[in-house]
């Protein structure tokens, strides 16, 4: 919706949503088991201040930024969800996320790289999040350029300090 009316190829939600050609994106696969796990977490944390259940459609995130003392409880709850669904568990800044196993931003990038208009081109990926590291490694493995934004540990061979630096780099690239 941010690019409307454009409907470009792309991936979302760690690669669980893929649109390989122009047109509407297919819906992510949502199972009854996933719906039940979301409902169970929402019921469990509905009245708990500082904890937010985020239903991402094909994934679930449990945010505890405003309740950092409940970190271990949230971690265990999401471990149970991931185990029940056969999902992978991701840990982020004050969030745990369960997503389908074997799917990440790197698998999405590799899939897109095989399709037009990306096939045969030099790829660039810019990311600022732990989950972006999969795509950074993938793009570099394909001979492209991975760029990490910020000071966090990274596999990227290039780094920019912040969003302003990214915008400056993009403008300078266009000028060349």
Image (cartoon, grey):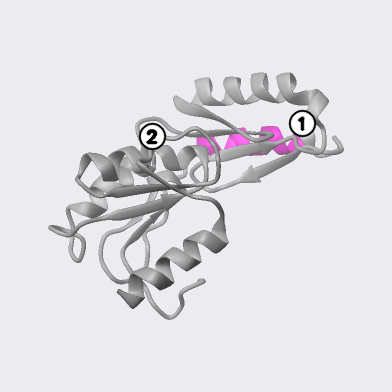
- Percent x, y of residue 113: 22, 53
Q: How far apart are marks 2 and 1 (CA)?
A: 38 Å
The stretch in magenta equals: 31-44
Local packing at callout 1 (Cα closer than 10 Å; few below 14, some 14-19, many 20+) is few
Q: Is mark 2 on a helix, strand or loop?
A: loop
Q: Is mark 1 on a helix, strand or loop?
A: helix
Say which residue label 1 marks: 44
x, y percent for residue 4: 46, 78
Whether residue 29 can be seen here: no
The residue positioned farthest toward the bottom in the image shown: 5
Q: Quadrant of the C terminus?
A: bottom left
Q: Using the image as rendered, state which of residue 60 and residue 92 is in the foreground.
A: 92
- Nearest to the observer: residue 111 or residue 77: 111
Q: Where is residue 83 in the image (x, y as percent from the top left)?
A: 51, 20
Q: Who comes first in sequence, dot 2 or dot 1?
A: 1
Which residue sits at x=25%, y=54%?
A: 112
Describe residue 22's horizontal placement relative to residue 90 as left or right. left
Residue at 79% x, 24% y is 70
In the picture shown, does residue 45 fall above or below 146?
A: above
- The dot on residue 142 is none
Q: How crowded is mark 2: few (under 14 residues within 10 Å), some or many (20 or more)?
A: some
Q: Dividing the picture into quarters, in which one does residue 102 lie?
A: top left
131 or 101: nearer the viewer = 131
Left or right of residue 134, residue 122 in this image: left
**At 42% from the left edge and 38% from the top edge, which residue is drawn?**
133
Relative to 3, does residue 127 appear above or below in the rendering? above
Chief SS of the magenta region: helix
The disc at residue 155 is 2
């Amino acid at each position: 919706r941010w690019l409307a009316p454009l409907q470009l190829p792309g991936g979302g939600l760690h690669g669980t949503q893929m649109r390989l050609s122009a047109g509407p994106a297919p819906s992510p696969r949502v199972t009854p088991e996933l719906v039940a796990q979301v409902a169970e977490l929402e019921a469990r944390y509905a009245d708990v201040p500082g904890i937010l259940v985020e239903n991402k459609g094909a994934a679930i995130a449990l945010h505890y930024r405003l309740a950092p003392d409940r970190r271990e409880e949230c971690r265990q709850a999401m471990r149970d969800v991931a185990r029940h669904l056969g999902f992978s568990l991701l840990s982020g800044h004050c969030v745990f996320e369960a997503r389908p196993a074997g799917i990440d931003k790197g698998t999405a990038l590799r899939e897109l790289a095989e399709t037009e208009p990306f096939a045969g081109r030099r790829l660039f990926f810019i990311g600022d999040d732990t989950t972006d590291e999969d795509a950074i490694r993938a793009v570099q493995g394909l001979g492209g350029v991975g760029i990490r934004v910020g000071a966090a540990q990274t596999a990227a061979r290039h780094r920019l300090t912040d969003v302003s630096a990214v915008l400056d780099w993009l403008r300078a690239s266009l000028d060349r």
